[in-house]
Image (cartoon, rainbow, N blue to C red):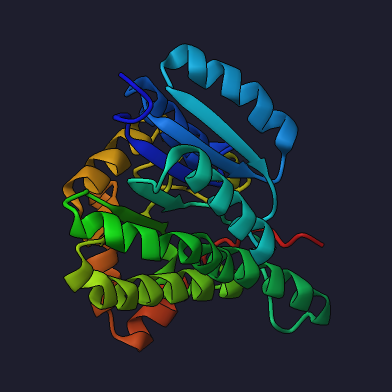
Amino acid sequence: MSLSSAQKVFITGASSGIGHALAGHYAAQGAVLGLVARRGELLDAQADTLKQAGAAAVACYALDVTRREAVQAAAEDFIARHGVPDIVIANAGVSFGTLSEHHEDFEVIRRIFETNVFGMIATFMPFIAGMQQAAQQGKACRLVGIASVAGIRGLPGAEAYSASKAATISYLESLRVELRESGVKVVTIAPGYIETPMTAINPYPMPFLLPVREAARRFARAIDRGSSYVVIPWQMGIVAKVLRLLPNGLYDRLYANVQRKPRVF
């Protein structure tokens, strides 16, 4: 497959977890990859492996998605070298336990929102105009946001993470409606528990825990379909629907004593 005909995929949070697995999935399909992560040394090592796995080309960008100018520059470089991507996956995210009663948690809460919400917006912004033009010419374009089932109801001990993921779900829905007529599809993926470094620190049971490679395969299938909103694995989708319907009083009693995600302090 030539570079010009290869699918072009831009992924943030690509050095580990879901982002790493998605990069591997698309590499095996011969895609041109743009990979973003803070840890440049991991990206560089990953690039060689992905090329051996079949990637047509790999462009690596060591940056923090909270630095909007850096994200903009990376997007412009990728477009200049490879053209407008078919798929942009805003996957970068952080998760820590936080409690508003602790003043020292304020900066952690800020960091969670800057990465999970503003980082997603900063990732999409540089590509939207070009993807709109490409979609009008018949290209299948996807903006993909990785949300979480934690955004459906507020989880105790994870105030900032739950709130940030609720914000991404609403943001992605607004963006989906806004871009509907342009032909650019906005895909919201709300994972349940996936085997990643982020979930490895959780001290509580994780029902329907999904291996990360299988998760990536299912994510890619939803992206290919252009699904507007999907919970993966599907079992957590049922749990999410039930949680959404629970009266506040019942929900409060059920979750008041669940184990919390560890704080960083």
Image location (x, y in percent) of residue 257: 53, 70
For this view, does 144 lie left or right of residue 34? left
Image: 166 above or below 18: below
Image location (x, y in percent) of residue 2: 33, 21
Residue drawn at x 54%, y 52% as measured from the top left = 75
Image location (x, y in percent) of residue 180: 20, 71
Residue 220 appearing in the image = yes
Quadrant in which the C terminus is drawn:
bottom right
For this view, does 105 lie left or right of residue 117? right
Foreground pick, 96 / 43: 43
Image location (x, y in percent) of residue 217: 30, 33
Residue 149 appearing in the image = no
Residue drawn at x 32%, y 24% as measured from the top left = 29
Q: Residue furthest top?
A: 52
Image: 201 above or below 16: below
Image: 22 above or below 118: above
Image: 136 above or below 121: above
For this view, does 214 lie left or right of residue 70? left
Residue drawn at x 68%, y 73% as measured from the top left = 109
Count the marks. 0
Toward which corner of the image does residue 46 lie, by quadrant? top right
Foreground pick, 40 / 81: 81
Quadrant in which the N terminus is drawn:
top left
Residue drawn at x 33%, y 58% as measured from the top left = 131
Foreground pick, 134 / 111: 134
